[in-house]
Image: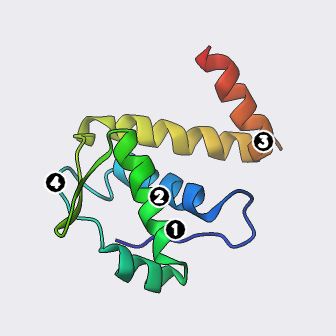
Amino acid sequence: MRIHLDPTAPGPIFARLADALRAAIVDGRIGFGERLPPSRDLAEGLDVNVHTVLRAYRVLRDEGFIELHPGRGATVAKRLGHHTALAGAIHDLVDEARLNGVDEVALLALVREAWR
């Protein structure tokens, strides 16, 4: 599993990490039952504080994406293999927005509005 965090992106690092992991789960790069890297290893690999990783893991736990097992690590708790079409649609949406000059903030506002 390869996770990349854009150092220039806005927002707290833990939230960006949670977003990256959530996206990897939704698009199938990390599958149901798969173990996430130990927090220390991921923190070292991303050059962030271990508490940042733990906070991102707690966010994903609270959302039901992962289960945390003290001393045994974190595993993916949701079966999302059937959402590969959703992942494709999301990528298509982002590509279309970029082609039409719609920035990230505007696109997210449009998605929020459509969600309501």
Where is mark 1, residue-wise? Answer: 52
- Under mark 4, the amino acid is Gly
Q: Residues within 10 Å of mark 3 (few under 14, many from 20)?
A: few
Residue 105 image label: 3
The numbered mark, 2 or 3, whose residue comes first in the sequence reads 2
Mark 2 element type:
helix
CA distance for labels 1 and 3: 24 Å
Q: Is residue 27 visible?
A: no
- Under mark 3, the amino acid is Val
Where is mark 4, residue-wise? Answer: 33
Is 52 on the left-hand or right-hand side of 96? left
Q: Nearer the viewer, mark 1 or mark 3?
A: 1
Q: Are marks 1 and 2 in contact (CB under 8 Å)?
A: yes
Query: x, y (%) of residue 69?
Result: 19, 59
Mark 4 element type:
loop
Where is mark 2, residue-wise? Answer: 56
Report the front residue among 31 and 100.
Answer: 31
Report the front residue among 98 and 10.
Answer: 10
Is 99 on the left-hand or right-hand side of 24? right
CA distance for labels 4 and 2: 18 Å
Q: Are marks 1 and 3 in contact (CB under 8 Å)?
A: no
